[in-house]
Amino acid sequence: RIAPEFLQVGLPFFAFMLLGTFGIGSLMNSKYDKIDRKKKYESPEDVLKKMQKNLAEDKTTVSNEQLKFVPMPGQDRPDLNTDYSNMSREQLTQELKALRDSEKWTGLNFSAQKAAIKKQIRAAK
C-alpha cells in the first residue's frame, strides 16, 4: 500500500524531475542544432589559400611546399598501389578485411586497393 504523503509530495516531485530532464535535454539539443546549421565550414582548399595569403603578407620564411595538403589514404595515388604478389592467400584475405574495416570506419574509398587484392586472390586459386 502506498502512503498518501508519497502520492501528494513524492510522486509529483519525481514526475517533475523526470519531465524536466527530458525537457531541458530537448531544448539544449535544438539550441546546438541551430548553432551548427548557422556555421559555415570552409573547404581545405579555402583554408590553404587563406594560409598562403597570410604568409605572403607576413613575408615569413615558410615556403609554399610546406603548406601542401597531403592526399588522404584511398585517393588515387601511385604510391598507395602496394605489390601484393608476394603475399600468401591468408595474408591477402586479412589485408582485404582490414581495408573493408578501414573503409567502414573512415568513410574513405579503397576500391582500387580492394580490386588489386581480389585479383591476386583469384590468381592464387
Image (cartoon, rainbow, N blue to C red):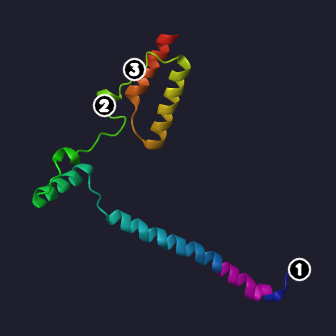
| Nearer to us: label 3 or label 1 | 3
Determine whether the residue tagged by mark 1 lies in a helix, strand or loop.
Answer: loop
Q: Within 10 Å of the Cα at label 2, are there few (<14), some (14-19), or many (20+) other Cα atoms? A: some
- Residue under numbered circle 3: 83
- Residue under numbered circle 1: 1
Of the two numbered discs 3 and 1 on the same chain, state the one appearing first in sequence.
Answer: 1
Q: 104 left or right of 81?
A: right
Residue 56's x, y, as percent? 11, 56
**Residue shown at 16% from the left, 53% from the top:** 52
Q: Say which amino acid is labelled 3.
A: Asp
Q: Say which amino acid is labelled 1.
A: Arg
Residue 76, label in figure: 2
Q: Is residue 113 magenta?
A: no
Residue 38's x, y, as percent? 32, 66
Quadrant that contains the N terminus = bottom right
Point out the stretch of residues depicted in magenta: 6-16
The mark total stands at 3
Determine whether the residue tagged by mark 3 lies in a helix, strand or loop.
Answer: loop
Determine whether the residue tagged by mark 2 lies in a helix, strand or loop.
Answer: loop
Marks 3/2: CA–CA distance = 15 Å
